[in-house]
Image (cartoon, rainbow, N blue to C red):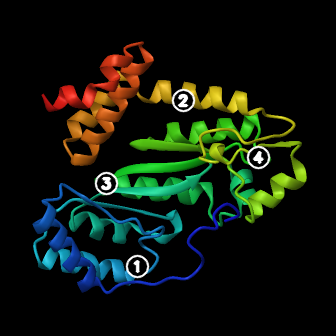
Amino acid sequence: CSVPQIAGNHFRARSPKNVVDELVWIRNEYKADFVTFTDEVFTYEKERVLEICSEIKRRKLKVPWDCQTRVDCVSRELLAKMRSANCQLVSFGVESGSQKILNAMKKGTTVEQNQRAIKWAKEMGLSVIIYLIVGYPGETKQSLKQTFDFIKKTEPDDVYMYLATPYPSTELGDLVKDTCWKISQDWNHYEMQTPVFEKAGLSFKKINNERENFYNNLYSPSYILRQSLKGTIYSQIMMQNALHQLLWRIKLPWLSANFKKLIRL
């Protein structure tokens, strides 16, 4: 899409056997509770993923694992195979619930594809995290509402929502430079949580307020209870993060800051 320019556009892959050899080593050497595949699009080669899953099952490896991918690189059958090989969580780069914004980003996916992939994953018993970008040039109150409505409809287990950040030499960077009236030159702010450009229309103050309100509603006592009842390593992490946010919101910062220490006690 028009945002990333970090890892390049080449694909190199290790063999399924080599990958599972390392999983076994990680389990034996570090007693890992779970493993995360950090490939940007883990399921880019579906046959390779199927072979990895078959090798995991053949060796009876029980370590939970998770991955991230695109919604147009999964199928119901592939997700089922991943779940049978002890995948417990999949993260999707959804980016927006507005087709207009997806098109502007040149994401190459549709809102319907996003909905379908999340539905399939949940049907397979997988936890789902979605990644979103808000404040992209062209964002309006209506498109932002479409994104929040999308979240309510699909009910992912967690949502990571970032601000559009125009890194230099990317298509987004050039677009913002040409169309926006104010761009920050403080590179410390280019961490996707701080507004770095302003434009006419929807202000970043409004976007930040909407984002904060969304998280306040998401991380509720009922959310914490739902994640607690799932009983997976990932749901426990989500539950702890949500409780941390909830305690901070209700003005118990000391308890929030020391929550993990108290849990260990």
Residue that mark 1 sits on:
46
Upstream in sequence: badge 1 or badge 4: 1
Tell me which residue sits at (72%, 54%) in the image: 166
Please tell me which residue lies in front, 90 or 198: 198
Residue that mark 3 sits on:
126
Q: Secondary structure at mark 3?
A: loop
Marks 3 and 2 close (CB-CB < 8 Å): no
Q: Is residue 161 left or right of residue 1?
A: left
C-alpha distance separating marks 2 and 4 = 29 Å
Upstream in sequence: badge 4 or badge 3: 3
Tell me which residue sits at (75%, 58%) in the image: 172
Upstream in sequence: badge 3 or badge 2: 3
C-alpha distance separating marks 3 and 2 = 23 Å
Q: Quadrant of the N terminus?
A: bottom right
Q: Is residue 18 left or right of residue 68?
A: left
Residue that mark 4 sits on:
185
Upstream in sequence: badge 3 or badge 1: 1
Residue that mark 2 sits on:
214
| Residue type, numbered disc 2 | Phe
Q: Is residue 236 left or right of residue 172?
A: left
